[in-house]
Image (cartoon, grey):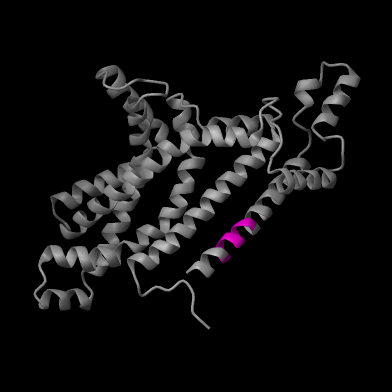
Amino acid sequence: MLKYILKRILYMFFVLLIVTTITFFLMHFIPGDPLTAMVQKLPEQTKINYYAKYGLDKPVYIQYLVFLKGIFTQGTLGESIRFPGRNVMDVLQKYSGFSSEIGLVAVAIGFVIGVILGTLAALKQNKLPDRVLGVIAILGISVPVYILGTVFQYLFTVKWPLFPTLGWGTPAHKVLPILCMSFAPLATYTRYMRSSVLDVINQDYITMAEAKGLSFSQVVRHHVLRNSILPSLTILGPNVADVFTGSFVIESIFSIPGLGSYYITAVNDRDFPMIIGCAMFYTAIYVLSLLVVDILYVIIDPRIRLAQDK
């Protein structure tokens, strides 16, 4: 397993390099640059100094080589153009924590509760619990997160003032954003688990386990869950990355100082270093989450092997 993990980490750096390269050249091939609006009213010499400061007066391939040199020799992604004096790495370290705090908790809640509800729905197929959970799952997938956030704000901050409307700092500020972000994953995992459990409980080995005298709870815990949870694990990795890239909507609604707002601002202002930094961060989260899912496969189902010994 160690050899597999090291190989995947090496692949991760290769993927990061490809994503960074594509992002870098795409941004520079779009007409215009991030300094146009900032320096249009300044004297000509001042404009030249600004372009020289950020290296935008050099050919694109030279800018790319300088950028790679900064990463590999200094471990830096450069300075934000939109926020002068702020290093991109510092911004990522400081503000990604806010996004991860609500995003990872939301995914964890959605996964655990979704697995439980999906199993319950399958075991109560075509009965009242199954129908109720089916409606909840459809609502969770179809209702946009910004609608859900607005409704939650009205219900739990205006109608019944139980939680703060905006801001960050106390545990009470985190409740509504986490609930909003966990609703869609919960619905997704509920549907996946229901379909998977329905398929597993009709397998021959489940009938064999029951014939051997195992109780219903033992069959569910040791056979049904372990074999039906794998499809849900498959989408867990991408889902972790999705909550980071999609968290800017919730961050805007609840005024959370997360990384999402910086990403949107960077795209609008064409802040090249910040855009590349966010792209690398989101790519790393995605690849790492897929690696964790692959390892969980082996832990849950020993029949799965990460690599064959030659």
| Residue 218 picture location, percent across and down | 15, 66
Residue at 87%, 42% in the rendered image: 59
Residue 280 visible here: yes
Residue 140 falls left or right of residue 54: left
| Residue 115 picture location, percent across and down | 28, 53
Residue 25 visible here: no
| Residue 244 picture location, percent across and down | 49, 41
Query: Is 29 part of what is drawn in magenta?
Result: no
Residue at 87%, 35% in the rendered image: 57
Above or below residue 166? Residue 13 is below
Residue 25 falls left or right of residue 289: right
Residue 38 falls left or right of residue 137: right
| Residue 268 picture location, percent across and down | 65, 30
**Which span of residues is magenta-colored?**
7-13
| Nearer-the-camera pick, 195 or 222 | 222
Above or below residue 257? Residue 92 is below
Residue at 11%, 78% in the rendered image: 212
The majority secondary structure of the magenta stretch comes to helix
Res. 194 image quadrant: bottom left
Residue that protrudes farthest toward the right in the picture: 45
Count of all numbered marks drawn on residues in the image: 0
Res. 82 image quadrant: top right
